[in-house]
Image: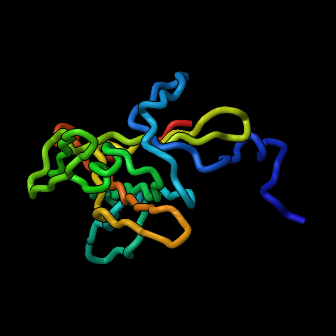
């Protein structure tokens, strides 16, 4: 019977839901203050290039060496269950502020996105060999708005669709990195 299973398969598995953070240092520990929050239902990451064939009369559509990548769309999706101030600001996306008076925090939104609204977000997961796989989403903004789900005999949740954005100083480098 044919199979892709080898003696190395277990070491190369990604295990568990991992953790979302605002910082990552290779070989370092994860600070609890950098953890974005607990999630439910796991999540997903996609990095999709926008490719185009270079159109020349008389050649087929797909010719090796005649393709270009115009850009990459990198997206990290998850559902959070913790309603912390920084998380709500992340979910609201750009143009959001929080002001705390006493025990009450008020969130306000505008139509202006500041450079500081873009955040580097990391997903860090364990592998079967005890190492980590890390995805860095550069200059992330939530593109799905603040969508809170409320349930009877359950906990409130809200989803994030974080999209990486190119840096204006380096338009050739995709807005994500993967470390293994």
The residue shown at (28%, 52%) is 141
Quadrant in the picture for the N terminus? bottom right
The residue shown at (47%, 43%) is 20
The residue shown at (31%, 77%) is 58
Quadrant in the picture for the C terminus? top right
Q: Which colouring convention does the figure follow?
A: rainbow
Residue 59 is situated, as x and y percent measured from the top left of the image, at 35, 74
Q: In front here: 161 or 148? A: 148
Residue 16 is situated, as x and y percent measured from the top left of the image, at 65, 48
Please give the count of numbered marks on the rendered protein.
0
Q: Is residue 180 left or right of residue 65?
A: right
Do we see residue 100 in this rendering? yes
Q: Is residue 9 left or right of residue 82?
A: right
Residue 154 is situated, as x and y percent measured from the top left of the image, at 54, 66
Give the residue furthest to the right: 1
Q: Quadrant of residue 147?
A: bottom left
The residue shown at (28%, 42%) is 103
Give the residue furthest to the front: 102
Residue 145 is situated, as x and y percent measured from the top left of the image, at 28, 63
Q: Quadrant of residue 34?
A: top left
Do we see residue 172 in this rendering? no
Q: In front here: 48 or 14? A: 14
Q: In front here: 127 or 70? A: 127
Give the residue furthest to the top: 28
């Amino acid at each position: 019977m044919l199979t892709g299973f080898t003696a190395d398969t277990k070491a190369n598995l990604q295990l568990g839901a991992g953790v979302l953070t605002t910082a990552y240092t290779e070989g370092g520990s994860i600070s609890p203050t950098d953890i974005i929050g607990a999630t439910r239902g796991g999540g997903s990451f996609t990095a999709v290039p926008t490719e185009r064939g270079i159109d020349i009369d008389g050649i087929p559509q797909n010719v090796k060496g005649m393709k270009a990548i115009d850009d990459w769309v990198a997206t990290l999706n998850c559902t959070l269950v913790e309603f912390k101030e920084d998380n709500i600001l992340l979910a609201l996306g750009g143009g959001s502020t929080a002001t705390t008076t006493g025990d009450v925090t008020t969130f306000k939104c505008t139509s202006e996105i500041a450079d500081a609204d873009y955040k580097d977000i990391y997903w860090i997961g364990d592998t079967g060999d005890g190492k980590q796989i890390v995805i860095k989403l550069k200059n992330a903004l939530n593109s799905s708005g603040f969508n809170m789900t409320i349930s009877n005999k359950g906990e409130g949740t809200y989803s994030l669709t974080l999209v990486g954005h190119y840096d204006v100083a380096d338009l050739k480098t995709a807005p994500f990195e993967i470390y293994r």
